[in-house]
Amino acid sequence: MSLKFYNTLTRSLEEFKPIQEGRVGLYTCGPTVYNYAHIGNFRAYIFEDILRRTLKFCGYDVTQVMNLTDVDDKTIRDSREKGMGLDSFTSVYKKAFFDDIETLNIEKAEHYPEATKHIQGMIKIIESLIDKGVAYIGDDSSVYFSIEKFPSYGCLAHIDMSGQRAGARVKSDEYGKESVADFALWKHWVKEDGNVHWDSPWGRGRPGWHIECSAMSIALLGNHFDIHTGGIDNMFPHHEDEIAQSEASTGEKFVNYWLHCAHLIVNGEKMSKSLGNFYTLRDLIKEGYTGREIRWLIMSVHYRQHLNFTFDSLIGTRSVLKRIDAFFVRLKEKIKESEQGMDDAKRLVEGTEAAVRNGLEDDLNTSAALAAFFDFMKDVNRTMDADEVGGAAAELLLDFCRKIDAVFGALNVDKEEDIPADIIQMAEDRIQARTNRDFAKADKLRDEITARGWRVEDTAKGHRIVKA
Ligand SMILES: [Zn+2]
């Protein structure tokens, strides 16, 4: 097999061929830092994390750029509502974003450019578009991109441009397909912008949202790079406009592969504040769910499928993860020095690695890759039941799990649960009580441990404490 992605540009599954052998330039649209990111946003960031980790797993050297949109219609509107300066307002949510991705074990990108630090690059692109006659200054002194001057406009969203209203203009950052129009590259200052403005050859103003991503991606990845991703919501107008302004400016193809993840819905309905089913990551953590559980649930569904997020399914991940944790504890107990089961272990690792790889290479089919891991776990558990796994084989199997967890980022092969010190002490006192044949005391200690949400299990090599 070779690595294949579903390319939104061509609506087909294509073999991935990098521009430069062994290297990948990846641009992933980042957060607009005007609020805490919600779980729909994190679906996109987890999909992009799996993409990044899979590319690395396949041997590529990845340069990922994720922008922070710290100036646009929404950041200006909400910072003014709160009576805060734009920078101090957005810095709260920038920090929150980095805390959140750590909670979800999302790997850091190589670059996190901020739009407000790339204004000059944006101005340069807009100047070149005006020079080429593809952009013009409107009667409101803002600069617009003329979509009729770019014949392939609509290539990504597959919009039929015949019969479109020539010369219609749209100034707001967000609009629907039915409002296809010349879009704003530079927005002339209006009083609602307050003190948010930069000087430009067209007077004081600020960039449109779409030009921000073109400027930051070109600055860090070059005119032409490999992969650009985002949520399906970003395909139009954001990504369509990025293609138009970038290619019209540089005269080169902008991006080879466009990958988009599908919507996340909650309990079968579109997530919205009015339906009361709108969740930020922080809301779920406050309810007692963990980043690992949320990551697991999100990545278990293929990124191009609708993901129906329910609390039942989130609770369901708990028992799955508990089984995985118990599996590693058991495997690590096989430390006796023996070569038993080595051939079987090698065969199993080889077969499972091929199946995991095939899944991931098939347009990041995480559900197939995880299914291969579950089959592996079942087989290993069976051989452990028959006591046919020696120490060397156990090490080999554990190493394999560490290797594939470079992609999943949630198996946690070596992450012991944090057992409170007093629970450990109680468990030890219990053993002592049993040795002293004080069974009443031993039982009482066991009950106390259970009441605290832990369980003591007696094994051949003493006892172990697990979360109840
Ligand atoms: Zn973007």
Image (spheres, rainbow, N blue to C red):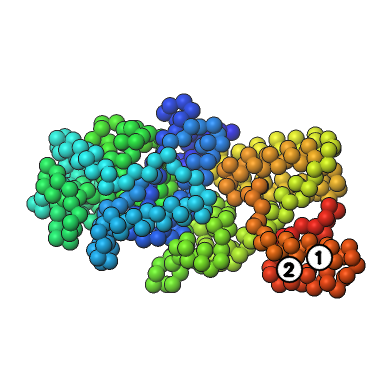
The alpha-carbon separation of the residues under discs 2 and 1 comes to 10 Å
Report the mark closest to the observer, 2 or 1. Answer: 1
Tell me the amino acid under the disc marked 1. Arg
> Where is residue 4 drawn, in percent x and y?
51, 37
Please name the residue that numbered disc 1 is placed on. 430
Give yes or no for contact between labels 2 and 1 (Cβ–Cβ under 8 Å). yes
User: Which quarter shows the N terminus?
Assistant: top right
- Location of residue 222 (image quadrant): top left
Asked if residue 24 can be seen in this view, the reply is: yes
Specify whether 267 is left or right of 426: left
Closer to the camera in the image, 383 or 410:
410
Say which residue appears at 56% left-offset and 36% top-offset.
57
Q: Earlier in the sequence, mark 2 or mark 1?
A: 1
Tell me the amino acid under the disc marked 2. Ile
> Where is residue 167 drawn, in percent x and y?
15, 49
Residue 337 drawn above or below residue 425? above
Q: Which mark is residue 206?
A: none
Closer to the camera in the image, 99 or 233:
99
Residue 147 drawn above or below residue 434? above
User: Which quarter shows the C terminus?
Assistant: bottom right
Specify whether 71 is left or right of 24: left
Say which residue appears at 31% left-offset and 41% top-offset.
216
Please name the residue that numbered disc 2 is placed on. 449
Q: Is mark 2 on a helix, strand or loop?
A: helix
- Location of residue 444 (image quadrant): bottom right
Say which residue appears at 26% left-offset and 31% top-offset.
251
> Where is residue 295 drawn, in percent x and y?
54, 54
